[in-house]
Amino acid sequence: MALSASSTREAVGLLRRATKRGLIQRTGVEVVVDADVPEIPVGVDGEALLIPTPVRCTIEPGALRVLVPRHRPGVPPAQPALDLVRLRELAWGHRAAAHVSA
């Protein structure tokens, strides 16, 4: 898979899956990550490393697991759980408890 974003806004849209522009999906047996710097920071099995570029990774079906931080830029906060009782009250324009007879 390759991602290309021409702006921060476009990158955030890709993260939120609001757009597919800039997203290219391919299959293959090797991934090469290159950069404009001689080394890039990576995490391997929970360890922070600097690896010389280009980085070459061989793909084994079902073997690659990619983890990203939960609190990363561009990810909206989780929505609160839906309160169906409150939703019904709002839809009917009054509190449901007022119509319960003892």
Image (cartoon, grey):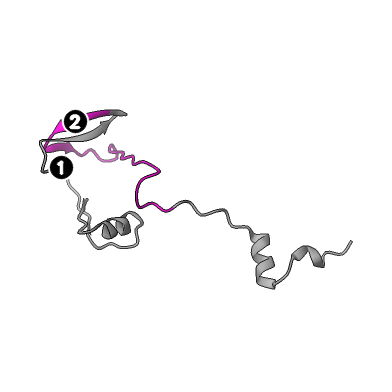
State whether residue 40 is above or below residue 85: above
In the image, the segment drawn in magenta is 48-76
Q: Amino acid at mark 2?
A: Leu
> What residue sits 66% from the left and 68% below the top?
90
What secondary structure is marked by label 1?
A: strand
Q: Which residue is mark 2?
A: 50
In the rendering, which numbered label is found on residue 8? none
* Residue 92 in the image, given as x and y percentages of width and height: 69, 72
Quadrant position of the C terminus in the picture: bottom right
* Residue 56 in the image, given as x and y percentages of width and height: 14, 37
> What residue sits 36% from the left and 41% below the top?
69
In the rendering, which numbered label is found on residue 33? 1
Tell me if residue 70 is in the magenta stretch.
Answer: yes
State whether residue 60 is above or below residue 5: above
> What residue sits 36% from the left and 56% below the top?
16
Q: Amino acid at mark 1?
A: Val
Q: Which SS type dominates the magenta stretch?
A: loop
Q: Quadrant of residue 46?
A: top left
Q: From the viewer's perspective, is the residue at label 1 or at label 2 nearer?
A: 2
Q: Cα distance, mark 1 to mark 2?
A: 13 Å
> What residue sits 20% from the left and 59% below the top?
6
> Relative to the observer, which residue lies in front, 75 or 58?
75
* Residue 31 in the image, given as x and y percentages of width and height: 16, 42
Tell me if residue 17 is in the magenta stretch.
Answer: no
